[in-house]
Amino acid sequence: MTYLLITFLVVLLVPLFAATWRTSLLGLSLQGLLLGWIALRDETAPSWHSLLVLVDLPIVRGLLVPAYFYRVLKRRKAPARSDVIAPNFFSWTLAGMLVFGAFRFAAAVVPAAALDSTQVVTHVAVASSALALGLFVLGSRNTVVSQAIGVLRIENAVTLFELADTPRLSLPIHLVVTIVFLAVMLTLGRFFSLLAYSSLGRNKQRSDIAK
């Protein structure tokens, strides 16, 4: 599974340097697909729980939510450039330091005698990196798009932490969590639309005043 975790880490980092909301949504989509792969890799027989995981991670988080936000932002003609962190060497260095610190943290908290400790350290390190970078994005920019992307990054980080634990969420709790997540994403998309309409209204008023 280590190669999946390293791929997840790469997917976390690339959108920080490619300053477009399309790249950020693509990164979130790949995160959802990878989370589903990690969660289902050891499943030997289909079950209701594995079906819910399939719906929640690769379908909802990997496909539906990014596609929904893409549709909303494209329809509202959002500017192509959308930096989730400040585009400078200091921010990129700080992101690298957060990842380094996450790996040091994982090495310190996972006992060396633990079963398959190398994989556990990698899992905790990547999940910690995801959480730290999500908080970094959340605190770096005050635009609505960046804040939403930061929240989704943190949500994926929490999910990755959960996948390191056994047993996992029971079926009813997982179903409720999935429903709440969908409701929050639909509400956020609606907020994007209302915000866009409000901005258009203000711009029109300014143009009328200028005339």
Image (cartoon, grey):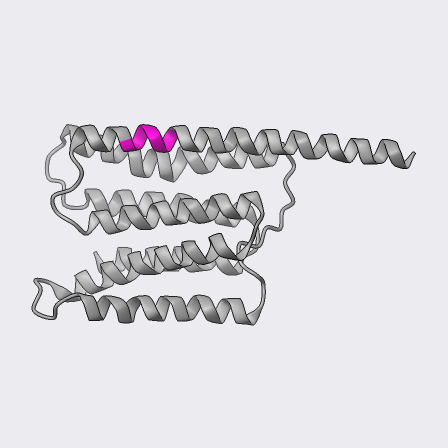
Relative placement, left or right, of 42 versus 55 is left
User: Which of the image's four quarters has the N terminus?
Assistant: bottom left
Relative placement, left or right, of 191 versus 158 is right
Relative placement, left or right, of 120 versus 153 is left
Number of marks in picture: 0
Q: Is residue 138 visible?
A: yes
Residue beneath the point at 11% across and 43% down: 167
Percent x, y of residue 98? 39, 67
Residue beneath the point at 12% across and 47% down: 166
- What's drawn in magenta, residue-wise? 177-182
Residue beneath the point at 26% across and 59% down: 3
Q: Main secondary structure of the magenta part?
A: helix
Percent x, y of residue 132? 38, 59
Percent x, y of residue 205? 80, 31
User: Which of the image's four quarters has the C terminus?
Assistant: top right
Residue 53 sits above or below residue 104 on the image? above
Percent x, y of residue 207? 84, 35
Relative placement, left or right, of 53 versus 188 is left
| Near-viewer residue (79 or 46) | 79
Residue beneath the point at 29% across and 56% down: 127
Q: Is residue 15 visible?
A: no
Q: Quadrant of residue 200?
A: top right
Q: Quadrant of residue 63?
A: top left
Q: Quadrant of residue 95?
A: bottom left
Q: Is residue 181 magenta?
A: yes
Q: Is residue 164 magenta?
A: no
Q: Which residue in the rendered view is the most extreme toward the right? A: 211
Residue 102 sits above or below residue 19 on the image? below
